[in-house]
Amino acid sequence: MSIKPLIILPDPILRQVSKPVERVDAQLRKFAGDMLDTMYDAPGIGLAAIQVGEPLRMLVIDLAKEGEEPAPQVFINPEVLASSDERSVYEEGCLSIPDYYAEVERPASVRVKYLDRDGKQQEVAAEGLLATCLQHEIDHLNGVLFIDHISKLKRDMVMKKFKKLAKDKPPTRMVG
Ligand code: NI
């Protein structure tokens, strides 16, 4: 088990476009486990690899509610095949943008193909929270954040706040 440090706004790493995973092997499965540990520790319901600094097209999701058995899911090289015209609104947050939430409108359902943790091709017709979560995390793989879907005025306010926070943060490394 290994918890990795989270990349926080305004770190430009979050704007990188992630590269496809070429091989699903033991090392990648271990990394997926680390991503899940990091997500549970935060805690969050979804995490993309870029949020721990790895520009790989993979993400983890667990939508189990408190008190339920964990239901970890790993999506490797996910691709949206189709989105519904019907849209839905959820209040979203992001582990890379702590303590900020905003309503985001997205397609209510999506069909996504991906490789599972065994490297097997899978397809899911997602709706509700899973549809929103998948779209939020797939956005991360393209360098897109949920604040890109809100008004410019709100986004500018968030950016300003996080730039200031980053500046005010005491240095974590002392070089003597
Ligand atoms: Ni996020």
Image (cartoon, rainbow, N blue to C red):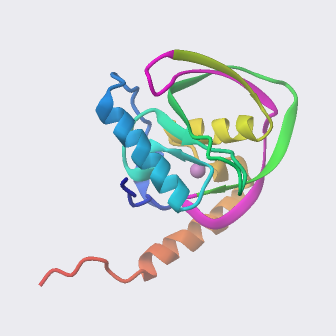
Overall secondary structure of the magenta stretch?
strand
User: Image point 50% across, 70% down: which residue?
Assistant: 163
Rendering quarter of residue 7: bottom left
Q: Is residue 22 left or right of residue 162?
A: left
Q: Is residue 110 above or below residue 16?
A: above
The magenta stretch spans residue 98: yes
Foreground pick, 121 / 54: 121
Q: Residue furthest left?
A: 176
- Identify the image quadrant of residue 62: top right
Query: Where's residue 91, x and y in %?
Result: 78, 54
State whether residue 137 is above or below residue 113.
below
Residue most toward the top?
Answer: 121
Quarter location, residue 155 = bottom right
* Left or right, 123 with reference to 28: right
Residue 66 at x, y = what percent? 71, 57
The C terminus sits in image quarter: bottom left
Location of residue 56 in the rendering, given as x and y in whole percent from the top left corner = 40, 35
The one of 30 and 130 positioned closer to us in this rendering: 30
Is residue 74 left or right of 106 when viewed as pictured?
A: left
Count the labels in the image: 0
Q: Is residue 67 magenta?
A: no
Q: Residue 108: percent from the left, percent from the top?
A: 82, 33
Q: Is residue 20 visible?
A: yes
Range of residues picked out in magenta: 95-120
Q: Is residue 153 visible?
A: no
Q: Looking at the picture, does residue 114 appear above or below residue 62? A: above
Name the residue rendered at 36%, 55% in the picture: 2
Q: Residue at x 80, y 37 (%)?
A: 128
| Residue drawn at point x = 63 percent, y = 50 percent | 45
